[in-house]
Image: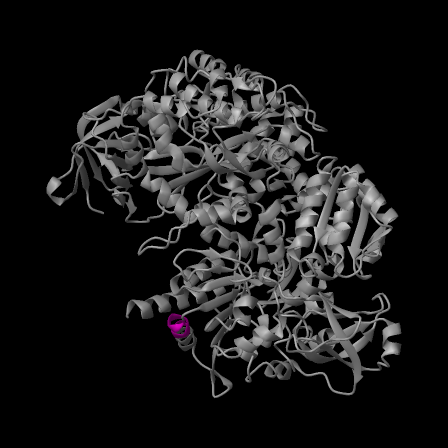
């Protein structure tokens, strides 16, 4: 995983958007639950994109800032070439840390690659461990 | 009915920035057993769920239960020893806790910041650039006939907002409720909010700024310079919307993180506010940020009256220093600058970028929260607190800056955030005084 | 607390007819007393110094929603006024809008010990009190805005004055305020639709009442309730050329109302009169019509005023008069905050820089001084800047010097716009200089009198008064104020001693103690059946039109640490 960013070049026209979901809000203060993972460790995609990338269940989403495995979920109201991950720990593995001098990281409109994977979705504890130790 | 059953009405919901104050709860044997009229998010929070049971301190990688006094002492030692502590969070607790927290930050010369930093911080920067023509929510309820939600997914993020304050509610001059209003949603994708709109304008991601500029150009009689399509929106749709805005009796733009977090960030908000200002040449028009946490607004208020600035305040110089981009939490963490952190009433573990969390994992972290969450994984000291708004009372500010007192409904075995911070502060002063 | 004696100072206590006498002031248990045992007392040597009662602020915007919105909008203002924390003091910020600590400290350094916040939108009253509770040292109180209250306007339209009295009492209690305040009556409701009212006989949309009707009805209610102060009014048409006619019409609108209590003649206090005394027809030919106001005040007892003195420099304007702030925004295009408050009032904020090179600013600067110089009875006019609108309150020392020194005025007039010729400052005001006794009136005595706080121990130093005292470094025997305005400025900027409730809070201009003061509130009593009838109407408003439930509306008692209920003198009609 590349945490510093900048060295990985994403050759893809897919944009990642993150944001709120009511189910995510319901579980806002119950984040260690499986239910939370089921709702938040999810990548909403248009059916066309799912076909194009041959996505069945899990996807690996990769940006220049990092990568994460989440469950794919079909949502045709999402336009093609745009994927949505609810705000939360999994989305944060790939969003951009650069605040452009205004304090706000890049939560929306990140260039990402999406690939089908058989890897599992990490539970929160294990996801957090990926940030511990090592160098920046 | 159970004789111990008590009904409490007019309960204030401590979840989102709508701060609904019309909830009814039933309490039996000191527990809330039923919640009426809240949305799913509010109901879930008010009914309650798993809690951190005991204060804890991390030893050899594992959190071990300790006494409250020991956890407070350890927290105070960490803060008193730090050169540059970060005191972050605050948005899900009361203004009384905020006041204590700012006093603590002043005492230890820390940086104090809240969740606005990753939410409507850019809106604050925009207000500091161009101002904000706005109003209270009742004004919108009674008068608005044109409602625009821009980059804001009301039905998911603020589920009762539309039925209490905006689209659906009947008002004094809008007796017909929804029928008396025209509702426009501008977003990058179809959402459950667009489903209840009269018109959905789909803008390409990162093109909001252009679209706002196009509307301003139409208002300034410069429509001829527009291309046929701006950010994926046909010129006709832009012309129609501009006309509709001018002809409204009372228009409002509610905006969310679709503006603050996408490309151009605060400049999107500057442009949206400038558009609103210019619309006042034609009619009455207001704009309002959709604030997330129930008291994110309150922290901004308290920090402003205490220090002069609404978020990201560095108190290490003895006077307040405010410079978003420098003193904002993710920047401070990304630069690896702070040497300890107190995290209260929020969860950066779940909401900060990975790079920020890497630094958080390296420094002593004190967490004050009722719930186990991703931040707990980084915490070296954990102090469980009473849930503000359910187990502790205090002041909160709604998204339109209306202050409402949240209630204490049931007793708790835990201390309130206000009390915990006060205990830590007193201990810090004791340690520093003893030097 | 030890007893205290302030010895050998020259005492100015105009409300007790002490126009500068060598006299000792004794304080016991926080109150002024005849004499004390000197050997147990703290002795302050005030020989060659000026001693006055603690200053009283009758009209300033120091706490609450729009003050804080102004701070939020202007980080540059905060930065310019930064002062690091001290051993005892918290960090200060602000150069026109101060943080809560700076507000308390700066007033105390100038010898002020009692402050009134002049505009509380009822729905946001909780916010005002949260800030007032954080302002150290001074005693405080606040005025509730009733100018565009929907139910109030309906009662006025229907002639239901009894219910209007009950409604006013309810809002005073719910907001924990003590004065009924009116800003642009009727006009703010019109501004809810982007419109405004200019004349006192125009009708506000839908509610169909006029500013004159609103003020007349509430003035009657104010007297029935026996509130200490008269109604406190920001007239319609503020800041516009030619507005003096509206101002006089406003004064005449309450002329038929009789005072409800014998200790006050005024029915209406017109605040920041400077902003309401303009002639001319546009920004180019605007001229001073202060003479019209002066003549009216000199020949009528039912109106009092404060100055609203404008000073050149950078400041922030903030008012419940949202329409006026939008007008200013259209002129300057600077950043603009507006906040209309449902069913009640409005507000707006904009930064401003007043320049002596600008015709209208020059005229405005002159008018405030003219009012203070030309009104004969100095207990009818109070010194204010409508902080921070016409200037921050920290400019008071300079204003005092301008009033005491015609030399200083002459000097300044050389550097201003030629529009100064359209004022009375170079002509009728030439050579007029106020005395220290006059200053003691317009900075404390007058305020206490107009607010009827004399019996409550403010603004004077007779036995029984609060032990609030300011000692200034002026030897009246040696002072030539006309030639030494700097000495006046320095003295009033930093009191040698400020004593609050018998405790030394400022010494040599530095804060040495930060006790918390009281908050004054009014709790008028209303006949139970009348109250019940009113509450039925008000409940309807909450159920259908407010965005907050009625049960969550009144400010809870926990918001006031140290409330003090002021006695009222209701007339028989409601008792």
The structure residue drawn at horizontal position 64% and vertical position 81%, both measured from the top left corner, is A127
Q: Is residue C293 above or below residue B199?
A: above
Please tell me which residue is depicted at 44% across the width and 81% down the height of the picture: B66
Q: How is the image coloured?
A: one colour
**Percent x, y for residue C430?**
37, 15
Where residue A24 sits in the image (x, y, percent)? 70, 69
The vertical placement of C485 against B53, above or below, is above
Query: In the drawing, does residue C412 fall left or right of residue B203?
Result: left
User: Which of the 4 image quarters holds residue B194?
Assistant: bottom right
Looking at the rendering, the stretch of residues picked out in magenta corresponds to B76-82
Q: Quadrant of residue B11?
A: bottom right
Task: Farthest residue to the left: give it.
Answer: C39
Quarter of the image for residue A44 reads bottom right
Residue nearer the viewer, C75 or A70: C75
Q: Is residue C544 visible?
A: no
Relative to A60, is B121 on the left or the right? left
Measured along the vertical axis of the image, is residue C298 above or below residue C190? above
Q: Position of residue B50 (x, y in %)?
A: 60, 75
Give how far across and how far down residue A101 sits, in percent. Answer: 58, 61
Q: Nearer the viewer, residue B62 or C77?
A: C77
In the rendered image, is residue B75 in sight?
A: yes
């Amino acid at each position: 995983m590349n945490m510093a960013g900048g060295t990985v070049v994403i050759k893809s026209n897919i944009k990642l958007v993150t944001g709120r979901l009511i189910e995510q809000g319901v579980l806002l203060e119950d984040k260690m639950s499986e239910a939370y993972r089921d709702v938040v460790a999810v990548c909403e995609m248009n059916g066309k994109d799912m076909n194009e990338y041959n996505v069945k269940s899990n996807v690996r989403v990769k940006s220049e800032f990092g990568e994460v495995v989440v469950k794919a979920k079909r949502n045709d109201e999402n336009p093609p070439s745009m994927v949505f991950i609810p705000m939360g720990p999994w989305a944060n593995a790939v969003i951009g840390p650069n605040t452009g001098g205004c304090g706000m990281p890049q939560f929306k409109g990140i260039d990402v690659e999406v690939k089908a994977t058989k890897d599992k979705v990490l539970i929160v504890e294990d996801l957090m461990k990926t940030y511990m130790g090592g160098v920046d | 009915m159970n004789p111990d059953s008590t009904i409490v009405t007019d309960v204030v919901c401590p979840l989102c920035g709508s701060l609904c104050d019309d909830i009814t709860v039933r309490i039996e044997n000191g527990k809330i057993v039923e919640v009426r009229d809240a949305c799913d998010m509010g109901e879930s929070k008010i009914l309650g769920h798993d809690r951190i049971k005991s204060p804890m301190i991390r030893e050899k990688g594992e959190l071990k239960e300790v006494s409250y006094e020991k956890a407070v002492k350890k927290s105070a030692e960490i803060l008193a020893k730090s050169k540059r502590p970060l005191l972050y969070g605050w948005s899900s607790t009361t203004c009384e806790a905020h006041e204590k927290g700012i006093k603590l930050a002043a005492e230890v010369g820390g940086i104090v910041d809240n969740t606005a930093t990753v939410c409507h911080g850019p809106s604050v920067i925009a207000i500091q650039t161009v101002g904000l023509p706005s109003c209270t929510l009742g004004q919108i309820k009674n008068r608005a006939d044109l409602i625009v939600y821009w980059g804001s997914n009301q039905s998911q993020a603020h589920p009762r907002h539309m039925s209490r304050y905006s689209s659906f509610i009947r008002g004094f001059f809008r007796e017909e409720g929804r029928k008396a209003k025209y509702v426009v949603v501008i977003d990058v994708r179809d959402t459950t909010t667009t489903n209840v709109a009269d018109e959905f304008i789909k803008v390409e991601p990162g093109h909001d700024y252009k679209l706002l500029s196009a509307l301003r150009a139409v208002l300034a009689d410069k429509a001829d310079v527009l291309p046929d399509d701006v950010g994926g929106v046909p010129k006709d749709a832009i012309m129609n919307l501009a006309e509709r805005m001018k002809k409204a009796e009372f228009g409002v733009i509610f905006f969310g993180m679709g503006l603050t977090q996408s490309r151009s960030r605060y400049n999107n908000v500057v442009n949206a506010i400038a558009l609103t200002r210019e619309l006042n040449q034609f009619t009455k028009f207001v704009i309002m940020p959709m604030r997330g946490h129930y008291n994110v607004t309150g922290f901004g208020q308290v920090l402003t009256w205490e220090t002069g600035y609404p978020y990201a305040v560095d108190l290490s110089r003895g006077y307040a220093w405010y410079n978003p981009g420098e003193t904002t939490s993710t920047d401070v963490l990304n630069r690896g600058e702070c040497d300890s952190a107190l995290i209260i009433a929020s969860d950066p573990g779940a909401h900060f970028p990975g790079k920020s969390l890497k630094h958080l994992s390296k420094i002593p972290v004190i967490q004050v929260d009722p719930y186990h969450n991703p931040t707990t994984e980084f915490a070296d000291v954990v102090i469980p607190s009473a849930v503000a708004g359910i187990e502790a009372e205090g002041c909160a500010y709604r998204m339109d800056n209306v202050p409402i007192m949240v209630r204490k409904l049931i007793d708790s075995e835990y201390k309130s955030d206000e009390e915990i911070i006060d205990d830590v502060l007193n201990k810090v002063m004791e340690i520093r005084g003893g030097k | 607390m030890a007893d205290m004696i302030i010895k050998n100072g020259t005492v100015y206590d105009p409300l007790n007819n002490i126009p500068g006498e060598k006299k000792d002031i004794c304080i016991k248990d926080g109150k002024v007393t005849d004499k004390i045992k000197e050997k147990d007392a703290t002795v302050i040597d005030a020989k060659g110094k000026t001693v006055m009662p603690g200053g009283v602020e009758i009209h300033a915007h120091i706490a609450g929603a729009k003050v804080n919105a102004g701070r939020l909008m202007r980080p540059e203002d905060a930065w310019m006024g930064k002062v690091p924390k001290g051993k005892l003091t918290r960090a200060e910020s602000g150069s026109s809008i101060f943080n809560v600590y700076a507000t308390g400290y700066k007033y105390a350094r100038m010898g002020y010990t009692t402050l009134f916040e002049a505009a509380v939108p009822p729905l946001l009253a909780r916010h005002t009190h949260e800030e007032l509770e954080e302002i150290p040292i001074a005693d405080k109180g606040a005025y509730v805005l009733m100018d565009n209250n929907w139910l109030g306007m309906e009662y006025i339209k229907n002639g239901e004055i009894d219910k209007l009295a009950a409604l006013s009492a309810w809002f005073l209690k719910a907001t924990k305020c003590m004065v009924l305040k009116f800003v642009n009556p009727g006009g703010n409701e019109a501004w809810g639709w982007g419109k405004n009212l200019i004349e006192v006989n125009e009708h506000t949309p839908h509610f169909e009442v006029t500013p004159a009707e609103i003020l007349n009805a509430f003035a009657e209610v104010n007297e029935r309730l026996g509130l200490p102060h008269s109604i406190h009014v920001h007239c319609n048409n503020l800041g516009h050329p030619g507005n003096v006619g509206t101002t006089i019409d406003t004064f005449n609108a309450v002329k038929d109302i009789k005072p409800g209590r014998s200790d006050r003649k005024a029915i209406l206090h017109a605040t920041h009169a400077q902003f309401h005394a303009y002639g001319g027809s546009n920004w180019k030919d605007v001229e001073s019509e202060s003479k019209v106001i002066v003549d009216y005040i000199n020949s009528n007892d039912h109106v009092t005023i404060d100055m609203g003195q404008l000073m050149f420099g950078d400041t922030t304007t903030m008012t419940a008069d949202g329409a006026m702030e939008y007008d200013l925004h259209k002129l300057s295009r600077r950043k603009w905050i507006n906040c209309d408050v449902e069913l009640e009032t409005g507000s707006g904020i904009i930064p401003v820089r007043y320049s002596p090179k600008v015709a209208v600013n020059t005229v405005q600067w002159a008018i405030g001084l003219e009012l203070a110089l030309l009104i004969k009875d100095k207990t009818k006019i109070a010194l204010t800047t409508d902080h921070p609108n016409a200037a921050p309150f920290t400019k008071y020392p300079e204003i005092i010097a301008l009033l005491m020194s015609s030399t200083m005025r002459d000097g300044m007039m050389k550097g201003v716009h030629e529009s100064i010729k359209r004022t009375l400052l170079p002509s009728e005001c030439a050579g007029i200089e106020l005395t220290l006794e006059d200053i003691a009136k317009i900075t404390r005595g007058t305020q206490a009198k107009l607010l009827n706080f004399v019996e409550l121990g403010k603004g004077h130093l007779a036995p029984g008064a609060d032990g609030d005292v300011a000692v200034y470094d002026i030897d009246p025997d040696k002072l030539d104020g006309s030639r030494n305005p700097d000495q006046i400025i320095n003295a009033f900027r930093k009191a040698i001693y400020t004593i609050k409730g018998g405790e030394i809070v400022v010494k040599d201009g530095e804060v040495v103690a930060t006790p918390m003061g009281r908050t004054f509130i009014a709790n008028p009593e209303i006949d139970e059946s009348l109250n019940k009838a009113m509450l039925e109407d008000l409940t309807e408003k909450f159920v259908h039109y407010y965005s907050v439930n009625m049960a969550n509306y009144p400010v809870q008692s926990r918001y006031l640490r140290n409330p003090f209920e002021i006695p009222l003198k209701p007339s028989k009609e409601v008792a």
